């Protein structure tokens, strides 16, 4: 296989991932992953299902602990963070989960306001106002605020998840498969929302998708993850001329090529 | 596979599990004393764990007390010692059956509910979502349930004690020909604070085990619906076994201390 794509220089990078390895039992998921996310830019990781895209994000958030390697955010090594320092670190992030991961015991507005009230000590009244403002921003009417997540469609849940991710105006936002499972029109609505909510705010975003349409729309740069490593990384416009057979196979969605689907349980 | 490899692997798995449980317990208990404590959640859980368990605990305690009176009568009548029925029922309920019956019933209700709820939150990534919203899951989810169980169980057992003794009274007066006033007088005369306290101490321990097993299994559930199902079963089975083992150990300790 090709050597790993060259890592862009770390100056100006908000997030730097260096040689991260992660395995579950005998299964190696990340195998020396190198990636830098430039400050204020939108980087999208593409790659097949089960290649470790979500695991990468969870390592950055400290939800999973890497077996080896280093993760720096604003130049700070995240492995040593404990207690209050870790809480402060987590307040930099917003995250839209693959399945939205809304709290089903709470109403929609309480979901959106949760990080403000519990994580940042904002008063309930003020947090409620912010929550409704963010719900408007993602195109949801005010009366949705009082519903429970189970009463919403998948697309609406994603929008609530998006509102929750941006509620506290975080410096960094992760989007994990924001359009997976949505119809093409709703996908485009979500893509536009992501672009609109992030553009011009200086927010750094790291997104995951295997939807190339979405990637082209929201990415400044694209990186491809394969077998635990980043095998290509570059500006969005260059994805069609990567010269990398793995990337070509992926973006054209061909069954034949260097990427072999592992068909096993 | 070689027999010794199998034994070795099982032992290692068991040790790993014990290690994980110890770390989880230490994390949860040390979070008791560090703010923030979510008091409103503690109250909500007390309603769910304590208040809503009252009917099932009350019913089981009543019939346990009743059948206890019937059986003790058979044993004591052989020696013409029927007058001891109220006392033996009282001690049996206060020291053993009140806490154990309430413990097992609440284990079935509450351990299962906690494991299913936290397990679903785990597999739908709601627990991860808490972390990304700068809220510590152990503090937000586990501590309120543990605290609520610690407070609720002694209250439930106190109720179970009263109803259990009443069950004995009803059976004795209806089926065994006891005079109500005599039965009650004997019961009141033999009421002893050590008997009550030992049962309530057990209740606190059982409450801790119930919430801990529910939370631990839910927190570490994997996979989808099947994983949550397994976590729920494990929670109930492990809580029930631990309650019975702890009961035996505690009874031994109380006996040794003449408590
Ligand atoms: N907590 C976990 N325990 C065990 N295996 C896991 C865990 N999380 C992810 N995996 C495994 O790691 C691989 C990559 O998962 P993931 O990052 O979710 O893939 P994707 O690229 O589709 O987001 C999968 O094979 C998955 O089964
Ligand atoms: Mg994923």
Image (tube, rainbow, N blue to C red):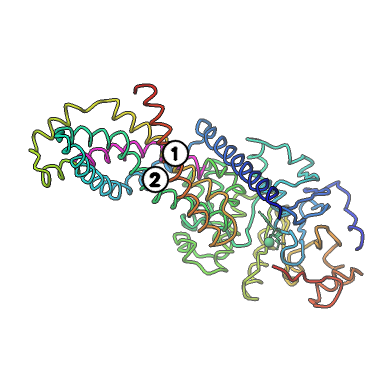
Measured Cα–Cα span from mark 2 to mark 1: 30 Å
For the image, the number of numbered tags is: 2
**Residue at mark 2:** B44
Q: Which mark is residue B245?
A: 1
Is residue B125 depicted above or below A152 in this figure?
Answer: above
The reply to whether the C-beta atoms of the residues labelled 2 and 1 are less than 8 Å apart is no
Is residue A58 depicted above or below B25 in this figure?
Answer: below
CB of mark 1 near ligand 1 (< 8 Å): no
Q: Which quarter of the rendered picture does the C terminus of chain A lie within?
A: bottom right
Q: Considering depth in this image, is B244 or B30 the residue closer to the camera?
A: B244
Q: Position of residue B215 (x, y in %)?
A: 50, 46
Residue at the image position 63 percent from the left and 58 percent from the top: A96
Q: Which mark is residue A187?
A: none
Q: Which quarter of the rendered picture does the N terminus of chain A lie within?
A: bottom right
Query: Which structural element holds mark 2?
Result: helix
Q: Considering depth in this image, is B28 or B214 the residue closer to the camera?
A: B214
Query: Which structural element holds mark 1?
Result: helix
Question: The residue marked by circle 2 belongs to what chain?
Answer: B
Q: Considering depth in this image, is A17 or A228 the residue closer to the camera?
A: A228
In this rendering, position of residue A206 left or right of residue B90: right
Q: Position of residue A256 (x, y in %)?
A: 83, 78
CB of mark 2 near ligand 1 (< 8 Å): no
User: Ligand 1, what quadrant?
Assistant: bottom right
Q: Quadrant of residue A119?
A: top right
Disc 2 and disc 1 on one polypeptide chain: yes
Is residue B60 depicted above or below B90 in this figure?
Answer: below
Question: The residue marked by circle 1 belongs to what chain?
Answer: B
Q: Choose the circle earlier in sequence order: 2 or 1.
A: 2
Instruction: Point out the stretch of residues depicted in magenta.
Output: B140-166
């Amino acid at each position: 296989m090709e050597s790993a794509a060259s890592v862009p220089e770390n100056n100006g990078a908000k997030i730097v991932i260096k040689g991260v390895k992660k395995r579950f039992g005998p299964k190696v998921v990340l195998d020396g992953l190198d990636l830098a996310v430039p400050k204020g830019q939108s980087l999208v990781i593409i790659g097949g299902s089960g290649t470790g895209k979500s695991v990468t994000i969870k390592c950055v958030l400290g939800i999973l602990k890497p077996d080896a390697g280093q993760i720096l955010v604003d130049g700070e090594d995240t492995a040593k963070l404990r207690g209050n320092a870790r809480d402060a670190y987590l307040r930099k992030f917003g995250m839209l989960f693959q399945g939205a991961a809304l709290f089903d015991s709470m109403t929609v507005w309480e979901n959106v306001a949760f990080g403000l009230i519990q994580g940042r000590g904002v008063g309930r009244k003020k947090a409620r106002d912010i929550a409704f403002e963010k719900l408007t921003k993602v195109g949801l009417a005010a009366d949705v605020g009082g519903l429970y997540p189970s009463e919403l469609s998948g697309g609406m849940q994603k929008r609530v998840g998006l509102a929750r991710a941006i509620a506290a105006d975080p410096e960094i936002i992760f989007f994990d498969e924001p359009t997976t499972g949505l119809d093409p029109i709703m996908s485009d609505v979500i893509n536009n929302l992501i672009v609109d909510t992030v553009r011009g705010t200086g927010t750094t975003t790291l997104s995951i998708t295997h939807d190339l349409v979405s990637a082209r729309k929201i990415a400044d740069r694209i990186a491809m993850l394969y077998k635990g490593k980043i095998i290509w990384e570059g500006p969005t416009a260059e994805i069609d001329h990567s010269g990398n057979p793995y990337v070509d196979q992926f973006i054209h969605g061909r069954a034949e090529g260097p990427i072999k689907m592992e068909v096993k349980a | 596979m070689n027999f010794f490899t199998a034994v070795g692997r099982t032992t290692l798995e068991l040790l790993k599990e014990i290690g994980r449980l110890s770390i989880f317990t230490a994390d949860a208990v040390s979070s008791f004393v560090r703010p923030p404590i979510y008091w409103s959640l503690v109250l909500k859980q007390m309603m769910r764990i304590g208040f809503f368990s009252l009917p099932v605990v009350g019913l089981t305690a009543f019939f346990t007390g009743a059948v206890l009176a019937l059986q003790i009568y058979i044993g004591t009548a052989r020696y013409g010692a029927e007058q001891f029925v109220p006392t033996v029922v009282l001690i049996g309920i206060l020291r053993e059956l009140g806490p154990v019956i309430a413990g097992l019933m609440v284990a079935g209700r509450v351990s299962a509910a906690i494991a299913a709820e936290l397990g679903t939150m785990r597999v739908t990534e709601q627990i991860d979502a808490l972390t990304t919203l700068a809220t510590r899951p152990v503090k937000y989810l586990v501590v309120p349930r543990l605290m609520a169980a610690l407070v609720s169980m002694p209250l439930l057992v106190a109720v179970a004690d009263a109803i259990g003794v009443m069950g004995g009274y009803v059976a004795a007066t209806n089926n065994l020909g006891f005079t109500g006033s005599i039965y009650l007088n004997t019961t009141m005369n033999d009421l002893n604070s050590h008997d009550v306290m030992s049962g309530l101490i057990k209740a606190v321990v059982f409450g801790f085990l119930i919430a801990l097993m529910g939370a631990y299994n839910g927190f570490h559930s994997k996979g989808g619906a099947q994983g949550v199902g397994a976590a729920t079963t494990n929670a109930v089975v492990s809580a029930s076994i631990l309650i019975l083992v702890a009961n035996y150990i505690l009874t031994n300790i109380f006996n040794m201390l003449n408590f």
